[in-house]
Amino acid sequence: MRVIDAHVHTLDDYQPMTPFQDMGRVDRLLHWMDDADVEKAVMLPVVADSSPDNNGECARWARDHPDRLAAMTDVPLHESNAGERVRAARDQYGAVAISCYPSTPDLAWLTEPDADPLWGAFSDSGLPCNLHVSPPNYSHVIAAARQHPDVSILLNHFALPKSGGVAPDDATYGGLAEAADVPNLFVKISAFYAAADTPWDPACPTPLAYLQRLVDLLGAGRLLFGTDWPPAGRHLSYRQGVEIVRTFADLSDDDRGLILAGTAARVFGI
């Protein structure tokens, strides 16, 4: 079964992983992808003081390995030139999406008229918008997705339910159930450790319960698998992260195929 890992970080010196900061090297990632029979991975740049050019590095690695790697471009969407950078990302970096870890705790501004030019840039570029969003901002992101139905919006890491106290048995998933009829809003089934009560447990009962809730609410066609390698490597091996969904999740073959690759292939055009 085809597998696309929709969430990895790739850099030679990944400081948050110290003393194992070389786990993010591209050659190591490709090795583990081969070992786990993963066809392709989508890189999310980590643009930080220790890796200021990771947008360019990820773009270069995607050009060097076009059959194995694709790259997002990191753009701080609150900055005044964000729209310009979104429009340029495909030509400049070969981006398949824009990644943003918002610097503001309240994302209501994404729904306000001042943000319309930014969303216009997404619409014109055809690039998805990949966001790191927790439950307090679900309503804002859902509203933005409704306002801009031609822009695909993706949420990292199960939409970070545990950070907002959302339990797997919450029928509303902290309010995310309101997105059931918003087909351009997607959720990544990534960073299982962040949704786990026992992140060292390869059975991952709590993350798999969140997964089932999301399948019920949104459908597999709006879910994308990702490992969040290398941070996930603090807890499980790369292959274990893949097998959680490929082998152990209670899914139909059709749903498994969509989550492991089909949705990502459609959203990113890869």
Image (cartoon, grey):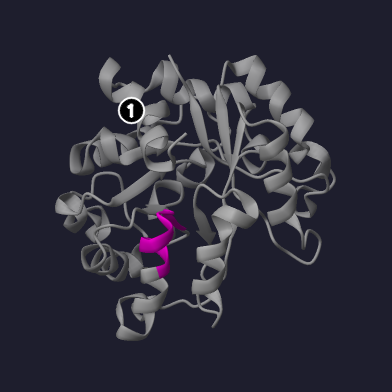
Region of the chain picked out in magenta, as a range: 121-130
Residue 29 covered by magenta stretch: no
Asked if residue 123 lies in the magenta stretch, the reply is: yes
Tag count: 1
Lateral position of residue 260 relative to residue 220, left or right: right
Displayed quadrant of residue 64: top right
Q: Position of residue 245 (x, y in %)?
A: 42, 25
> Is 23 drawn above or below residue 152 in the view shown?
above
Residue placed most toward the observer, 122 or 260: 122
Q: Residue at x 65, y 43 (%)?
A: 231
| Closer to us: 115 or 248 | 115
Q: Quadrant of residue 199?
A: top right
Look at label 1 and name its amino acid: Leu
Image position of 138 with respect to 228: above or below? below
Residue count near mark 1 (Cα–Cα under 10 Å), binned few <14, some 14–19, many ≥20: many
| Residue depicted at 39% across the width and 77% down the height | 117
Q: Is residue 206 visible?
A: no
Residue 89 seen in this snapshot:
yes
Q: Give x and y (percent) for residue 104.
A: 49, 78
SS label for mark 1: helix
| Residue drawn at 81 percent across, 61 percent down | 50
Residue under pointer 1: 258
Q: Position of residue 225 (x, y in %)?
A: 44, 34
Residue shown at the point (53%, 29%) measured from the top left: 201
Look at the image and tell me in which quarter the N terminus lies. Answer: top left
Residue 147 vs residue 84, the one in the foreground? 84
The percent position of residue 181, horizontal first and vertical second, equals: 14, 52
